Image (cartoon, grey):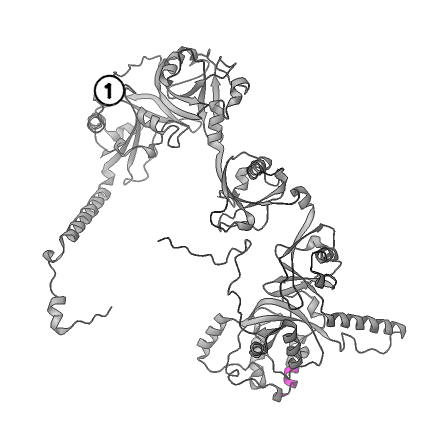
Amino acid sequence: MLVYVRVSQWDDVMCRVTKDDIPMYLRERLEVEQREKEARQKAKAEAHLYCSVRLARDADMAEQVGKRGVYFDLVDYDKLPEASTLRVRKHTKFGDLKKLVAERLGVPVEKQRYWTWTKRQNNTTRLADFQLGPEHEEQSLTDLREHADMPAVASKHSLLDLRLYLETPWPDADKPLHKPARNEMLLFFKHYDPETEQLRYVGHLFAPKAARMRDLFPMLRAMAGLPPDAPLQCYEEIKWEPSIMVDAISAAALLYSNAQLETGDIIAFQVAQQGDGDGSEAEGEGGASRYRFPIVKDFLSWVCNRMLVKFKRLDAWSQEGEGFTLELLKGMGYDDVTAELARHLGLASPDLLRLTQQNGFSQQPMRSAVRYRAVSDLARLLSHSNHPTDTLYYEVLDLPLPQLEALKTLKVNFHDERTALVGEPHTIRVARDAVVGDVLEELRKRLPPEHAGKRLRLLELLHSKIFKVCDMTEEVGGVNAEYWTLRAEPVPQDELEQEQEQEQEGQADAGGGGGGGGGGVGEGGPLLIHVYHVAPDRQEQQHSTAGSGGGGAISGAGGGKGGSKQQLQQQQQPHQPQQQQLQQQDTEQQAPQQQREEPAGQQQQAVVPVLPFGEPFLLRIGRAETLDSIKTRIRTRLGVEAAAFAKWRFCFVPGGNRSLPEYLADGDVPAERFATPTAGHALGADLPFLGCEHEDKGSKRPTGHRAAYGFERPVKINS
């Protein structure tokens, strides 16, 4: 950046800045930032000398279980309070750590007992049957790694993460620690209330291995605050993934021999349901039917499989605030999902719903809807290319989905003679073995009276090009309505008259024994050509202007530059038949030069490819009809004002991708440039067409469609 300074103020601007020139509030902020930066650098440099010790206590378990997203297991170490994490040197002795814990957490050393964790064969983490006693106080924290189940350190700079369970008297902190006997094991307990659907941690007990489950009931009732005579039923939490496993424990079962319990196991208990006082599972009868989840196993299964799914109407998916959320289960089948959705919408039958999955990358609906019972469960409905989503789109149908899928559904746009859209798109449903003629007859019933009596035809369009004129006897089963845009339109009167003349000539030829040819479509009859609205490719135009520097332009009308233009066309169309290229060159050489006059300024404009837009149409032209006559008929058909139509330019574009246009003068005969008279009825990817070049007054980019993922989306700025 260039800055101008007055000579008289040079000493004031370029003076030496000292500490006293900086305001006090800025100096304080800079000093704080500098201290923080130095502290981070020091911590990073000394990271290999320290380790992190995380301590979980009963109070932390009571705070997390059922409240902070923890239902299975006991504690999530990532959710522990900051005070429970200590950063100490690796070579700190275990005895010094206990003194530091007493200082930081206020737990006397004599009331501290530390346990390590172990990973079991079913990939669950439980307390190990090993406690760190006085014999370990002289060991450093790094030596304790052989007793704790911790991941291997990736490098010498990685922090050692030591996770321990700190047993303290809880909830009464004044009581001394219980001294466990050799035949006792440490068990953890949770209480489940089916009425409130709450699971909470209530504490731990040292239980004799030879005791029965019912021997612990008095202590469990006291821990949960239940009446002394409340019947209990107990369950053991075994594993959470890939599927939850919770087994019932009989009240008469021996803890070690029958229930096979050991130190670190977790027991969930609840008040026994009616007729279930022996501790076995409730059968869902009597009092159990009052609750949504009568036993803890059902509750944990619901917690494990529940999903919040957003539902949006397919025709309004982009509207902000549209939709609602339902709580469903992963294992729900297709029928269960639609039943829940129908119940929320108040529909009589779930078969009236059709679902559409969400694209996990574009966050838009998929192109195709989900077929009836084609997806087995909700988890697969909410997965796209291994990318999970949380949204489904729905449609409310006017007939059951199985019946709808037995029909062929086509969305057809009806356009009038001026190619203007009439009304809204029509949804036509016909049998899958029906033909195009059946579709048009069904459409005719929905058209206004002025169009219902006319002869119709069906076109397949894509990117403002006509690709196919469907035969009336073609089966609709092969029509891909999701890819093509289907347009129905009346057949113009001049084309109907041409067909009548051809039929009369055919009958005359048959009556005369086949002699006296001539006058047929293949020899000298009219042509049916494609006419597209086009505009120059702006990127190619800018590139061409920059590359040529404004000179050396190619004349659009041929003349002295005709050879160069033909060479460019041949380079961009290597697939064009040689006979067609020679025919086009001969035609251009024979064209009178006096007819190739263009308005002033156009001869210096470079020829670039053109891009179609708007609604294309078919037009019948005569073999010897000039462009001036064709322009008059086009203006009359489209209803364009004279002033605006005067700015239009017309060009011939040969088949092929990115072909260069040949701009025509009013005296040119366009029919000479078209190869075959049946071009209008062939597949339209590489067909030549007559281009009407003018300004595109519509939207520069199409409106976003659910099947087009590359369209622009609005940007929201939240200030």
Q: Is residue 482 left or right of residue 8?
A: right
Residue 460 lies, in percent from the top left, at 65, 61
**Front-lying residue, 451 or 613:** 451
Name of the residue lying farthest toward the front: 449
- Image: 352 above or below 594: above
Residue 332 lies, in percent from the top left, at 55, 34
**Front-lying residue, 45 or 663:** 663
Q: Residue at x 13, y 70 (%)?
A: 10
**Front-lying residue, 269 or 442:** 442
Res 147 visible: no
Res 325 visible: yes
State the SS at label 1. helix
Q: Residue at x 20, y 44 (%)?
A: 39
Q: Amino acid at mark 1?
A: Lys
Residue 619 lies, in percent from the top left, at 68, 72
- Image: 276 above or below 44: above
* Residue 228 quadrant: top left
Residue 283 lies, in percent from the top left, at 54, 19
Q: Which residue is mark 1?
A: 111
Q: Main secondary structure of the magenta part?
A: helix
Q: Is residue 430 left or right of residue 697?
A: right
Disc 1 crowd, CA 10 A, few/some/many (<14, 14-19, 20+): some
Residue range in magenta is 587-592
The verdict on residue 590 being magenta is: yes
* Residue 146 quadrant: top left
